[in-house]
């Protein structure tokens, strides 16, 4: 039986702050929060749904922080964010209907490939590069695909958004991170909307973690804007690799 004691509140607060900090820079905050929520006594379904509650605020805080500094134009990106939201709703709604095991088996390989790309690809910095896909086509293909995945499974969505922005949209690392946080926020919110209908989120637990997520995301986004690719790239490589190893360990 889950009980929200003072000790558990303290652990959840510190966990959410660390997750918000890392997630605002390179994604992968769920690597920290979901296992801790399960250790605290939540079922896997409750942990995933509750993680969406607090992670939405962290991603939203980071997105606003980047927008205030001119890295994201919210007025021109709201339609793209709406697509990500709708895709997140659809993905979460299909959790019990679609076989996801095959995708989970492939996921560690994909994440390790993304980590290798950012670790060894030369010339990846905060400068924009050649655009391989128009913004409209990107919004109609890559965004709904990753948003659907975010609602359906979740882990690694930030890395997929980042890869799309860098490889196809031609964004520099910092600009890609800023736009990733906006879409992460939208698809997280969409997934949460669908999970709310199932009754799985533990709202009180999520509320306890929200202030810490906001604090961590504020500090993390400030560091990312100050240091840029020098901190984003290593963290992205570490979080993608750690997530892949965790998934492999779960399958063993």
Image (cartoon, rainbow, N blue to C red):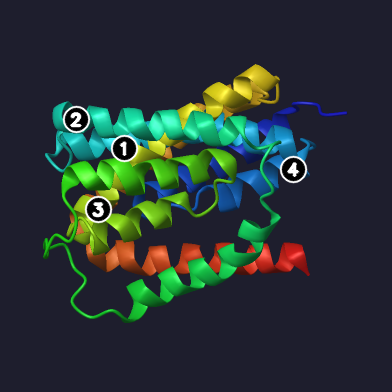
- Callout 2–callout 4 Cβ contact below 8 Å: no
Q: Which mark is residue 74?
A: 2
Secondary structure under badge 4?
Answer: helix
Taking the spot 50% from the left edge, 66% from the top edge, the residue there is: 111
Could you tell me residue 35's position as x and y percent? 68, 49
The answer to which of 21 and 168 lies nearer the viewer is 168
Question: Sequence order check: which comes first, mark 4 or mark 1?
Answer: 4
- Give the Cα separation between the discs numbered 3 and 1: 10 Å
Question: Sequence order check: which comes first, mark 2 or mark 4?
Answer: 4
Taking the spot 47% from the left edge, 28% from the top edge, the residue there is: 190
- Residue of label 3: 176
Question: Sequence order check: which comes first, mark 3 or mark 4?
Answer: 4
- Residue of label 1: 182
- Residue of label 4: 38
Left or right: residue 5 versus residue 141 is: right
Secondary structure under badge 3?
Answer: helix
Q: Nearer the viewer, mark 4 or mark 1?
A: 1
- Give the Cα separation between the discs numbered 2 and 1: 9 Å
Could you tell me residue 191's position as x and y percent? 53, 31
- Callout 2–callout 1 Cβ contact below 8 Å: yes
Question: Sequence order check: which comes first, mark 2 or mark 1?
Answer: 2
- Give the Cα separation between the discs numbered 4 and 1: 27 Å
- Callout 3–callout 1 Cβ contact below 8 Å: no
């Amino acid at each position: 039986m889950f009980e929200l004691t003072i000790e558990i509140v303290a652990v959840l607060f510190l966990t959410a702050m660390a997750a918000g900090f890392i997630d605002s820079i390179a994604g992968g905050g769920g690597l920290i929060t979901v296992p801790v929520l399960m250790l605290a006594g939540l079922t896997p379904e409750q942990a995933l749904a509750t993680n969406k509650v607090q992670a939405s605020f962290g991603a939203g805080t980071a997105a606003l922080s980047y927008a205030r500094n001119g890295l994201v134009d919210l007025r021109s990106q709201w339609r793209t964010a709406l697509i990500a939201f709708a895709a997140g709703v659809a993905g979460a709604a299909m959790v019990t209907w679609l076989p996801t095991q095959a995708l989970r088996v492939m996921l560690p390989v994909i994440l390790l490939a993304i980590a290798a790309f950012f670790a060894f690809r030369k010339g990846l910095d905060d400068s924009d590069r050649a655009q391989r896909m128009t913004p409209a086509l990107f919004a109609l293909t890559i965004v709904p695909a990753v948003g659907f995945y975010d609602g359906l499974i979740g882990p690694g969505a930030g890395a997929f958004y980042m890869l799309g922005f860098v490889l196809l949209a031609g964004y520099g690392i910092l600009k890609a991170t800023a736009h990733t946080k906006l879409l992460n926020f939208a698809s997280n919110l969409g997934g949460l909307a669908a999970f709310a209908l199932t009754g799985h989120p533990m709202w009180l637990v999520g509320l306890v973690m929200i202030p810490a997520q906001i604090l961590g995301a504020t500090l993390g986004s400030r560091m990312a804007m100050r240091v840029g690719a020098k901190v984003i790239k290593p963290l992205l490589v570490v979080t993608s690799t750690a997530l892949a190893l965790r998934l492999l360990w779960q399958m063993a």
